[in-house]
Amino acid sequence: MPMDIQQHAREIGLGLDLFSCIQCGKCTGGCPVSLTTALNVRSLVYGALIGEIDGPVHREELWDCTCCFTCVARCPKDVRPAEVIIALRSLLVEEGKVPGTIGNALMGIFRQGNPLGYAREDRTAWMDGLGVKPAQEGCETLLFTCCSSAYDVRAQAATKALVRVLQAAGVDFGHLGTEETCCGNEVRRVGEMGLFEMLVEEGKPLLEGIGAARMVATSPHCMNTFRHEYKLGMDVLHYTQLLARLLDEGKLNLTGRVEKVVTYHDPCFLGKQNGIFDEPREVLKAVPGMKFVEMDRIRERSLCCEGGGGRMWFEGTNTEGRLAFQRVQEAADTGAEILAVACPFCMAMLDDAVKVKGLSERLKVMDIAELVAMAL
Amino acid sequence: MTQKPAALVIGAGIAGIQAALDIADAGFPVYLVEREPSVGGRMAQLDKTFPTLDCSSCILTPKMVSVGQHPNIELLTYSEVVAVEGEAGGFRVTIKKKPRYVEEEICRGCGLCAEACRMHGRVVDVFNQGLGKRAAIYVPFPQAVPLVYTVDPTACLYLTRGVCGKTFKCQDACPTGAINFEQKERFTEVDVAAVIVATGFDLIDPRTKPEFGYGVYPNVITGLEFERLSSASGPTSGKIVLNGKEPRDAVFIHCVGSRDPHTGAPYCSRICCMYTAKHAHLVRDKLPNARITVFYIDMRAFGKGYEEFYDRVKEERVIYRRGEPSEVYRRGDRLVVRAEDSLLGRTVEVEADLVVLATAVVPRADTPAVAKLLGLSLSPDGFFLEAHPKYRPVETARPGVFLAGCCQGPKDIPDTVAQAKAAAASALVVLHQAIAK
């Protein structure tokens, strides 16, 4: 059954104008998975435009897209190619043709407010004894922890470090506690529009009801959707932005030394999608004793870790050619001892890759917050 | 000068030169104002010209010499128009002559000053697109008209710091005593009946497309840099050599910044398809064994002899691949150009040791200021707006003021010269009417 993706895109509010596409191929040419999988977003845009994509058939490579939005950033004609993939995914979601692991994640969010399916009551287990104030009592800064930051053991360490840093800088911050629910950034990107709308409808009044001046998010993914899709009535910052500001204002004093060679991996949702390239580097360079080195592919040319767009819950069609493998090798080649990250998904993907590639002796993946906490 | 009404031509690239020559040949006086130290403009920077492969300097230099010697042309180089008052048939124009710190009438262009300059070989050579170094006292290129040296006020030690040793080495070296640091800017007023604007174009800064790594990798250069690299009068004497090495794999990328509303250049820049074909030919000519790849979106070879030239270049073993590259990165000591070959429907990585970016033609940065000065309008693309896109293509909304060349929009040399001649003809109508009055 041929479908009108333009019509569908309008219905789900993407406002895509595929007619402006000039088929230059810049989208596919920059797509991080286009060399390792069958995904060809330029071809999908064309197929959608001329109505030659047969119904929402199950095309496994549609789930390979990491929603890094390199294609969107580089498209000269504002076609927003990745949104075509999201629209196609949403048609698959409507027909229930979703990879099982993604389905489980969506179910976890629906039932427990997190994709891991852990109990909602356990969302705050990480903060035991840290003295984090309930946001409901009023606070200037609302700390929003990504589900990964709250439940994933490795990411929890970064979250705890961030709390110590914020406390040391005297920031008046609070946390929603077990009321905190998945932001839905990935939910929208796997095409579950109904669930995403529900999360926004329930989340927006809850978040805005706190009356905080700003939100600081642990994950660039949460930050992204709060900024652009929730359109919250408060400043939404990534934690590296807040740390850079605190350093700038002299509120955060780093006296300890971290005598390490460190490189930094730009998260796509922080860098390519939100233009935040400098603040994470400023924070790292403020850590005494640290030697900062850059990889070749950085900033706008950074290589995706493959953790976005639902890929945290779906292996992808090519498990051997993982970009994270390539990325950790690039990091190790700089001579860095530490690969700094600023996103819990990047942390998970790259930390795993370091182990798989046998680089654990040489390279450690650490969150920027952890490195800052080491220098307190 | 005669008592006939005069014309003002602003900008002495090929458009301004041609317009000035036509008006002067018709017997009317012309003030030709150029803000750089020499006439010549962009065309003087080019190596060969498509599709005939004429040497650009060889066909331009005689015209430059002509404007320098023409009895009806008063050449005002290193000068800028600062005010235009009045109306068609009776404009009063104020021209600022910037200090060269060299007396034009005395300098013989011998160059001993530049050899003696303490900054010799240390100043970025703008004419060579930064690929070479020169002194703080310079002529932009050997065929400069007038062949007179100029002190670069941004680089001269004396002018920037107030001291340059005990004596000025340039003054000591000058056999005619032409160097004069007491020179000040001067203003002159002239009366003209018509004005031709021929202020040319800029090229977009490729750093606005960071994915191509320009400014990160020395082997990623712009098309205009390639012209200087390939030119026999350029810093490598025409050898295609980067960092001391001849490239084995050259990749050319079309449409860098063009056809892209985000960069402010939503239009086709019109010259890049053809000059890239010419560049590919030049690489083949100089490096017979190089692998040459051109990435394109749509090939536009619309002019006389252009499709035939494109055919010729392809037959010279130049590979054209359809797809706009999305990224350039390093692998070992080589570069990788990553693109989708859309005819294959597959992403490819092409190794390269020379990447040439065909950057968008954009309006001069000071176009809005010039428009204000002259009372002109700009079209949405930022170039000067013509009075009517079809019937009055060289006129502006201000009677007596005409447009020539790329200040009105991107053009190749044949179209620029044609438009310059049209602007001259239109100006001549006004000049004749002014006699009748």
Image (spheres, coloured by chain):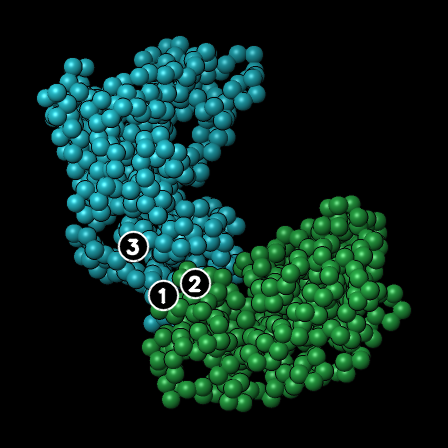
Residue shown at the point (37%, 37%) measured from the top left: B367
Check the residue under mark 1 and report the chain it is in.
Answer: A
Q: Is residue B67 above or below residue B347?
A: above
**Of the residues shown, which amino acid type is indicated by label 3?**
Cys
Check the residue under mark 2 and report the chain it is in.
Answer: A
Instruction: In the picture, one chain is green; tell me its letter.
Output: A
Quarter of image, res A263:
bottom right
**Of the residues shown, which amino acid type is indicated by label 2?**
Asp
What residue is pinned by disc 2? Answer: A78
What residue is pinned by disc 3? Answer: B273
**Marks 2/1: CA–CA distance:** 8 Å
Instruction: Return the residue nearer the eye: B135 or A64.
Output: A64
**Marks 2/3: CA–CA distance:** 23 Å
Quarter of image, res A107:
bottom right
Indicate left or right for B139 with A335 as reference: left
Which mark, by number, is residue A20? 1
Q: What is the crowding at mark 3: few (fewer than 14 residues within 10 Å), some, or many (at least 20)? A: many
Residue shown at the point (28%, 20%) measured from the top left: B92
Q: In this view, does B413 lie above or below A361?
A: above
Is there a contact, CB below 8 Å, between mark 2 and mark 1? yes
Instruction: In the picture, one chain is cyan; tell me its letter.
Output: B
Nearer to us of marks 2 and 3 is: 2
Residue shown at the point (36%, 24%) measured from the top left: B82
- Return the residue found at the far left: B436
- Image coordinates for residue A139, horizontal then vertical, percent: 79, 60
